[in-house]
Image: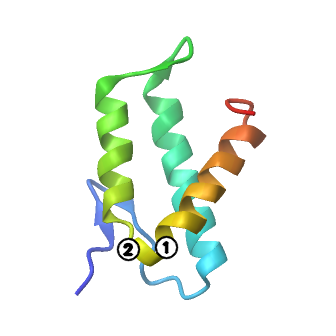
Amino acid sequence: MKKNDYKGYSLFNSVVDIELRAANRAAVMANIYEDNSRAGATSDHGLQLLENYFGEVPYEDRLPTYEMFRQTLCERGYAR
């Protein structure tokens, strides 16, 4: 059975729609990024959280999740 969270951050494994699942995961990753970044730099702890959270995403869902994460960061003004 798949885990449904990583350190309290939902992995949304029970969400059937892949686009919605990717969007939810991307929002969580963007929140982790925001919570652990100051003056344009992300803390080592924040980077580790992001890496470990993303590592819990099933392989087949990683590309759509990553693409949505990039899009979410752009929408929030963090990336181009």
**Above or below — where is 6 with respect to 3?**
above
Where does the N terminus fall, quadrant-wise? bottom left
Which residue: 60% across, 51% down? 69
Which residue: 64% across, 47% down? 70
Residue 62 screen position, x and y as percent: 48, 66
Q: Mark 2 points at which residue?
A: 58
Give SS at disc 1: helix
Give SS at disc 2: loop
**Above or below — where is 58 with respect to 63?**
below
**Above or below — where is 4 with respect to 10?**
below
Place residue 59 in its image quadrant. Answer: bottom left
Q: Which of 66 and 28 is in front in this view?
A: 66
Residue 13 screen position, x and y as percent: 42, 78
Place residue 9 in its image quadrant. Answer: bottom left
Q: 10 Å neighbourhood of mark 1: few (<14), some, or many (≥20)?
A: some
Residue 64 screen position, x and y as percent: 59, 67
Place residue 46 in its image quadrant. Answer: top left
Q: Mark 1 points at which residue?
A: 61
- Farthest-out residue, left: 1
Residue 35 screen position, x and y as percent: 47, 31
Amino acid type at image mark 2: Pro
Which residue: 38% across, 44% down? 50
Do residues under tags 1 and 2 come within 8 Å of each other at their CB atoms? yes
Amino acid type at image mark 1: Asp
